[in-house]
Every structure is written in structure tokens, then in C-alpha cells.
Amino acid sequence: MAHNFAKLGGVASNVVVAKVAHGLMRMTWSQNPISDAEAFAAIKGGVDALPSGVKMFLNSAEFYGPNLSTANLELLARFFDKYPDYADRTFLSVKGGSVPGHLVADGSRANLRRSVDSILKALRGTKRLDLFVPGRLDSKYEIEHYAVVLNEMVKEGKFDYIGLSTVDAVTIRRAHKVMPVVAVENGVSLQGYDQPTKDAIAACKELGISIIAYSPLGRGMLTDQSTSHRGINFNRLFNRSSDNFLDALSTIASRKGITLAQLSIAWVGALGDHVIPLPGSSNVKRTLENLRAGDVELSVEDLAEIGLVLEKYRRKGSW
């Protein structure tokens, strides 16, 4: 069987989720959000594709809305109002901890508690907050401070599990010593596989923590719809243009009978049983396409060929 299911890490090891998670950001982080009907179909279709006992990992944030509002969470509340049985079939991770209305971390006790309460208010009790993730860590506070505040709220029953986001291996190891980190949400893709990323993945594997790999499609670059980027010279970032890089990967995907996006997601998932790719989707067709990437088996030869492509068009910077 393909690696289409995964167990979460640490104290959540009894939770089984789909190998490919579902990011909800683009449903509402826009001045022209999609309709509830389209969003609901995208969420429901993914959950319906999973067998009994396997949950869909849904990823949201307190600020995924116009003007950094709670619109994404409010959409989820409407979804679970309409489909209450789906609350137990999903695992909800929500980022927070920012200054209201700004993407600036505020790790104070008062703001972390305000953020969690804001998330719970937006959800209106329709769905349990399974995992709370500070979107960024505030440099004014040590990780031990976060441990105290977040553990307090777990004990109070506000949410069940603790995660981190966009952190390096050193921070992951420090955090693991003082709090039960279940998952780390870091960016991982064929375009973003540098040494710090490798070190974070290795640290999580060693410590039994899941990696929730956001942007596995390189912010839309690693898809068959990325033609708008073709012809742009990225020699500053790669040894050759991005066209050649994308063409080489597309050739491998075509030979396997899958899309470039599916190849990209499958490659991220192949980095370890603890690595769960997190692509975003706003329509049911794309949700199901992404899920099928969890069933793609990449052979040793496939991985070696992809590795040669990465080496040939070695990354020199960030997109």
C-alpha cells in the first residue's frame, strides 16, 4: 500500500491523518473570497475520500481573512454547522499569536491567550481546536515562556496539542525539552530544500515530531499551471533558468503519468514517514488531485533522478 496515511507525532501518535494535508488559506485570504458552496465542496470532498478512522488535517489561521480577520475560521464554523458529523473526521490546526491586524508576533501571555480565545470564539464550538501553533516566535520571549503559557491552556482544555511554525533545528530541540511539541509547520519543497530545512526535518524525525510541510508546490511554481512564470530568468537563484528546472521535473512526472504538482507533493512526502505535505486548495478537483499524490510511489531510481535535477539546478537563494 502507498504511504497515504500518517500518524502525528509525540502525544498525538494515536491520531491518524491523510498523508497529504489540506491548507485553507486561499479560501478567504483575499478581497474576493470564494463562495461557501465551493469551499465546502473542497473540504467535504477531501474528507469523503478518506477511509474510516483517517482524519483530514485541516490548516487554518486566526489571520487568514481580509484585513487579517478571522474569516477563515468563521467559514469553518459555517461548514461544521452544516456538516456537524465532519468535526470528528478532521484534525484542525490553527496558527495564531500575532498582534491583531498585523503579521507581527506577540508572544506575551496576554496575547497568546487572547489569540486562542479569538480562535475559539470564531469557531463557536462547532469544532474542537486540536492543535494551536504560534505562527512565529517572538524574539522577546524564550521558548520556556511559551511552554508555560501553552501548557497552561492545554490543561485548561482550550486546545489539545502544541505546534510550532517556521523554526530551525536548534529551536525545535530546545522546545522539545520543555513542552510536548506534536508538529512543526515549516516550508519544504523542491525549491526550498536547503541545509536548515534538512536539519529541521532530521531533528523532528529524531524527536518523534511531525513536519507539516507548507508550500510543497513552491508557492505555485511547481505546478502545470505555472506557465506564467516561464520565460522569467531565475539565474540569480539557480545555475540555469527556471524553465529548464521545471521542464526536467515535468518530464519525470509525465513518464510516471502524474502532474508536476503531484510529483512535487509526493517528493516532499517521501522525505520521511513523519513529513506531511500541506498544499492549499480551494476547489474539490484540486483537493482530490493533491490527495492522490499521497498514493504516488517514488522508486529509488525516481528519487535519484530528481536528486540529479536538484543538483544540476542547485538553489542559490529564496524565491
Image: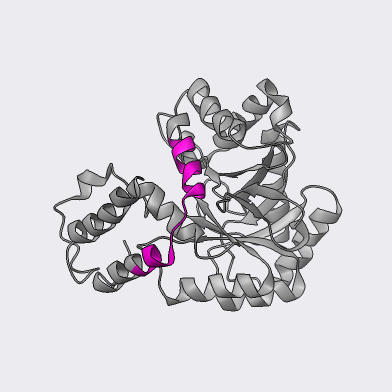
Q: Position of residue 41 (x, y in %)?
A: 53, 25
Q: Residue at x 58, y 34 (%)?
A: 49
> In which quadrant is the C terminus drawn?
bottom left
- Does residue 11 appear left or right of residue 20 in this picture? right
Tell me if residue 300 is in the magenta stretch: yes
- Does residue 9 appear left or right of residue 239 in this picture? right
Q: Residue at x 43, y 62 (%)?
A: 299
Q: Residue at x 52, y 41 (%)?
A: 64
For residue 194, what is the image quadrant? bottom left
Secondary structure predominantly adopted by residues drawn in magenta: helix
Q: Position of residue 120 (x, y in %)?
A: 72, 39
Tell me if residue 255 is in the magenta stretch: no
Q: Can residue 168 be seen by looking at this rendering?
A: no
Q: Can residue 203 be seen by looking at this rendering?
A: yes
Viewer-closest of 25 and 220: 220
Q: Position of residue 266 (x, y in %)?
A: 45, 54
